[in-house]
Image: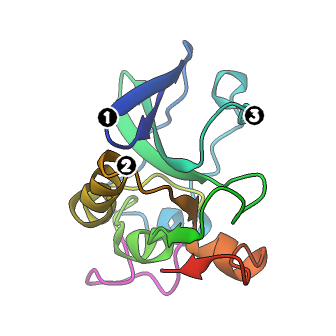
Amino acid sequence: MQIFRRGNTDELVETREGEALVGGNADDARLAVEGCGWPAVATCRIVVPANWRTGYYVANVAALEGSAWIPFFVRAASPGTATRILLKMSDSTAQAYTAWGGRSLYTSPHAPRVSFDRPYDDLDLFERYQVPFIRWAERSGIALDFCSSLDRILTRACSRRIACS
């Protein structure tokens, strides 16, 4: 497994060895709805170190069967302290379009709901639309705090100190 922070430049922040990926059936609606049910693998568990900056990160998990990219976002310990700009990443939208396991909310046939407990089959939404903005902001010296759409709802990460995007 390799973990990268995607920003002005791609930064490899962690590498781990060990078997981590279990493949999925090409069309199994149960996988889309219930998730992978993959066993927790010690080599893939990670506690985000305090020195990792807020940002957009991707983990590349690979095995003989193939590989998967798993995006995640590191929030600032205290959002709004270093910047007043919070970038909410589009993880809910990307997961809705992800057809890993054969189904998404938009395929035909479609899944009635989707699980976040599965990898994304395509990071295009992040890579095409959000990474260019992140790169531009960091090159321009504009500090950003990051959160997921679920963070925004569940943790009230956006406070009066932050201008939400």
* Contact, mark 3 vs mark 2 (Cβ under 8 Å): no
Quarter of the image for residue 67 reads: top left
The residue indicated by pointer 3 is 50
Q: Write the start and end of the magenta stretch as one range.
A: 103-114
Find out whether residue 151 is within the magenta segment: no
Mark 1 lies on a secondary structure that is: loop
| Residue 153 on image: x %, y % | 69, 82
Few, some or many residues within 10 Å of mark 2 (<14, 14–19, 20+): some
Quarter of the image for residue 14 reads: top right
Q: Is residue 1 visible?
A: no
Find out whether residue 110 is within the magenta segment: yes
Task: Check the image and report above or below for 88 versus 11.
Answer: below
Residue type (three-letter) at the residue carrying disc 3: Ala
- Residue at left 38%, top 52%? 25
Label 3 or label 2, whichever comes before in sequence order: 3
Q: Give the number of the mark in front: 3 or 2.
A: 2
* Contact, mark 1 vs mark 2 (Cβ under 8 Å): no
| Residue 12 on image: x %, y % | 44, 24
Mark 2 lies on a secondary structure that is: helix
| Residue 117 on image: x %, y % | 60, 58
The residue indicated by pointer 2 is 138
